[in-house]
Amino acid sequence: MVGLVQLLLKSNAASCLIEDYAACLELRSEESQFIENSSDDPGVLILQLLIDNISRPAPNVTHLLLKFDLDSNIERTILQPKFHYSCLKVILEILEKLLKRDVNALLYEFGFQLLYELCLDPLTCGPTMDLLSSKKYQFFVKHLDTIGVIPLPKRSSNQALRISSLHQRAWLLKLLAIELHAGDMSSSSHRDSCQSILAHLFGRDIIGIETDEIISHSLSLQEHAGTRSISKSKVLELLEVVQFRSPDTNMKLSQIISTLKYDLRVEDILGNPSSSGKGGVYYYSERGDRLIDLPSFRDKLWQKFSSSNPQLSNFGSEVEVNDVKETIQQLLRWGWKYNKNLEEQAAQLHMLTGWSQIVEVSASRRTSLLENQSEVLYQVLDASLTASASPDCSLKMAFILCQVALTCMAKLRDERFLCPSGFNSDGAAYLDVLMVKQLSNGACHSILFKLILAILRQESSEALRRRQYALLLSYFQYCQHILDPDVPKIVLQYLLLDEQDGEDLDLHKINKEQVELARANFAILRKEAQSLLDLVIKDATQGSEPGKTISLYVLDALICMDHERYFLSQLQSRGFLRSCLTSISSVSFQDGGHFLDSLQRACTLEAELALILRISHKYGKSGAQVLFSMGALEHIASCKAVNFLGSLRRVDTKLRKDAAVDFDGQRMIITPVLRLVFSLTSLIDTSEFLEVKNKIVREVIDFVKGHQSLFDKVLRKDISEADELAMEQINLVVGILSKVWPYEESDDCGFVQGLFGMMHALFSFDMETPSYGQSVRSQENQRKLELNRFRLCFSLSSYLYFLIRKKSLRLQISDAVSDYHASVQIQQPTLILLGSLLNSVTIALEGAAEEKSRLLNRIQDINELSRQEVDEIINMCARRDCVSSSDNIQKRRYVAMVEMCQVVGNRDQLITLLLPVAEQVLNIILIHLQDSSVTPDASGAVRKITYGSRAEPEEDISLLSGKLLPTLERLELLSEDKVSHNLKVFRRLVTSLKEMTIQKLAS
């Protein structure tokens, strides 16, 4: 009733009403007789009244009876139940004393629920949580020992008390989870409360202090925790409480029905969709359980009997009627047992849900308060997997436990690469810092073994397996690295040189445990491989689209860690690879104009392509040969998704309402297809050039011609405006064409013109220009763009070098640079253009080598850098979000060092790419100078360089030589120490070209 509270306040009846309700509740708690029907229990009715009214507009009856401040804002109330007699005071006293547990079980249960709902409501949460976390009550941890882990009552002796006891624990755990999740850590009471909760759950010896400012509180906390005996694994004890076989709700019903003399249509009565609600045989209890209404059930049975047997109901003998009565009574006894078992199932799930909430909140939000996070997370993960694999664990329970395991596994992965907690010494070695924190191999083996048992459990579902597959993938990722994957190996090799001090310490020995772990993982998987593959392949072929997608990624992961081609042979022998390729080729569209049947189907297609590509990468040319022999190119070529997306023009996507779909299609479909085709071109390297009819070459050329619009669209993209995805596509297209197009005798498609035009645009690019024609980018993005550009230069220069060596192509020294978008005669690149590229490569080499050397020196001196210098490095790397103002200098140094290592790795990758680009350009120019002959003209005054019948003006020769000589001199000065590569052969090539250049200038 709206306005009831104001009416009570105006009539001065509020105080009396508050005291009367409190007195009634207190009187009920002192009774010694159990009230079987909760609807007749005044205490339960009062608590339900309070719970039901919490969410009503303020001020409401709950606010009134619990003595919230109605004269001001409810959320600013300071609750003082010790000084105000109210229902709140009585409830807190009842829960503190916990007397007569069998009689007052429902009062405890709904009392905990009321406090939980109060902490959940936005108006009452603040005052309630402040009260419960105060030192006067310390309510949050008080009952972990009193009701949390005490044995459950036996089902056979007092099932109702057993059910209520489970609900009590559930509400308590959910209440603790709210405090851990929403407690204000700037408040000392809430901070101490959270630490105390974690101490009770996980053991007080692993509680840490989050910041330096609260170190002074640690001693008092330890003293408080030491006042009672605390189990280090109470969280596991709570899980053990809820681990029991759920009672069967369908127990003996089929047996009873089979023995019925008369057809009472019991299953029809219970299975009728309209059975719930008014007039039905089901009702919802105060806990929300859907139970059988026994009186209504009885009446329905008599109605069915009367309608089916009218002659017996009217004229039947007393014996027959008694038989029917006994049968109905038997069914009612079953219905009563069904209700109790269903209530127990729900209570069991409720407590497990509360347990999962407190574990997940602790793991996701409060791990900074735990000193030994990995051990705690492993214990919970291991226990969750053990419980989920148990035959006593129901499907619904397994689902909850799997979610907890997923959270713990994710936090274990995150926790590995955070700043190590032991990194507090200025003398910390690089290896100590860069070694990730990982569980022992034995612990990892235990996780994998129990996870496989959980996946292979008898009672399962696709929804559960999807989460289990996600957990399996997360585990595989966890096992991939012993060293921080953000730090490239080349950097570690350099840093470890100073760490060895004569000891035999190298990356091979560091990775020894990693190899052993991988082999043990494979051995565990192989032991259960047949059953596991049966299940995963079934989900990958017959499951829903999300089920297919994640199953394919599991197969991808199995291939990734394969030994001796075991999993590959399994997939081949089962015919899965062929069915996967067939599935790829059968992808279609709706109405011929929309993207895909659904985004989920697109995700499945992406996963199928990823699996096929993984086989090619994992097994190299042998894997590519397996795919090629199965007709992989033919299946991909017939994929309608590729045809449709490849034919879309940029203007088409701008006009469509779902233009974002095109980007997803490019990322999810087109780019993986191009990667796969490019990987198959690795088979061409073993072919002789003259084998024009080589099968792989012919099929790739056919694929290119069949998707000419796609290749043409990619080649015409403006490199200066290309993002990372577009640059990858350009690199792949150029890489594919550079491998196969030299074998094509005609250029009807115009690809040669496109490649030459791209050379003109890219080779003339000035690397000293600070920006790339776009808005200002972060330095990280610029490094990526620079790497992608030179990767493209490598493909183009490889293609050009191949034409010059194998097809005797010869270039002019100079010519006008034309727009490669224009439809003009093929304009070949010139030697002057290649000289420009060589100059850009030289500039990039010098800059990358200098930056790499400088950063390596700063990494070695990281412990000597001031906070300002460290912050400058963090800002330079655009990693300000990785540190907060409260992080100490050690954490900042760690972040700065890892970021510098990443930059060094990027620079080394660039150097590794630039050196072969430079070599190819040097060889091209050298070939031209060696093949040329210098002859006088008729007057004997002018000298020309000739290729066959073609002669070049002498000033062009001088121009080329003049541009080359300074660049060659700079290349000679490259330092092997800074470049970290052997330059002996490279310098010999530079010297040869330099000598010939000088000769040309002098002649």
Image (cartoon, rainbow, N blue to C red):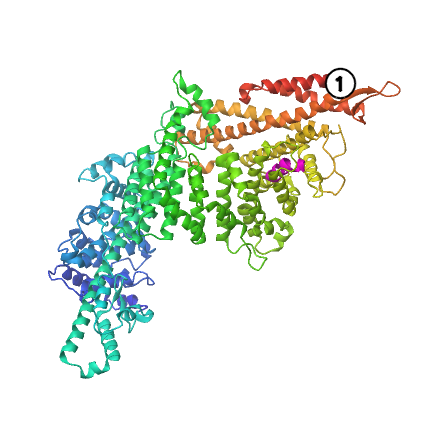
Left/right of residue 687 with respect to residue 868 in the rendered view: right
Could you say where residue 541 lies in the image, as x and y percent from the top left? 44, 51
The percent coordinates of residue 776 (x first, y second) are: 59, 38
The reply to whether residue 246 is in sight is yes
Q: Is residue 772 visible?
A: no
Q: Is residue 80 magenta?
A: no
What segment is highlighted magenta in the picture? 731-743
Image quarter where the C terminus lies is top right
Residue 733's image quarter? top right
Which x, y percent locates residue 146? 17, 48
Residue 248 spot, x, y in % from top left: 24, 58
Q: Nearer the viewer, residue 530 or 815?
A: 530
Mark 1 lies on a secondary structure that is: helix
Q: Residue at x 63, y 21 (%)?
A: 971
Number of marks drawn? 1
Q: Identify the main secondary structure in magenta.
A: helix
Name the residue carrying label 1: 1001
* Residue 66 horizontal side relative to residue 479, left or right: left
Q: Residues within 10 Å of mark 1 (few under 14, many from 20)?
A: some
Q: Check the image and report above or below for 868 versus 190.
A: above
Q: Nearer the viewer, residue 367 or 340?
A: 340
Amino acid type indicated by mark 1: Leu
Identify whether 218 is placed above or below 959.
below
Q: Is residue 384 above or below residue 947?
A: below
Residue at the right extreme?
939
Which residue lies at the image location 51% right of the left edge and 28% below the top edge? 904
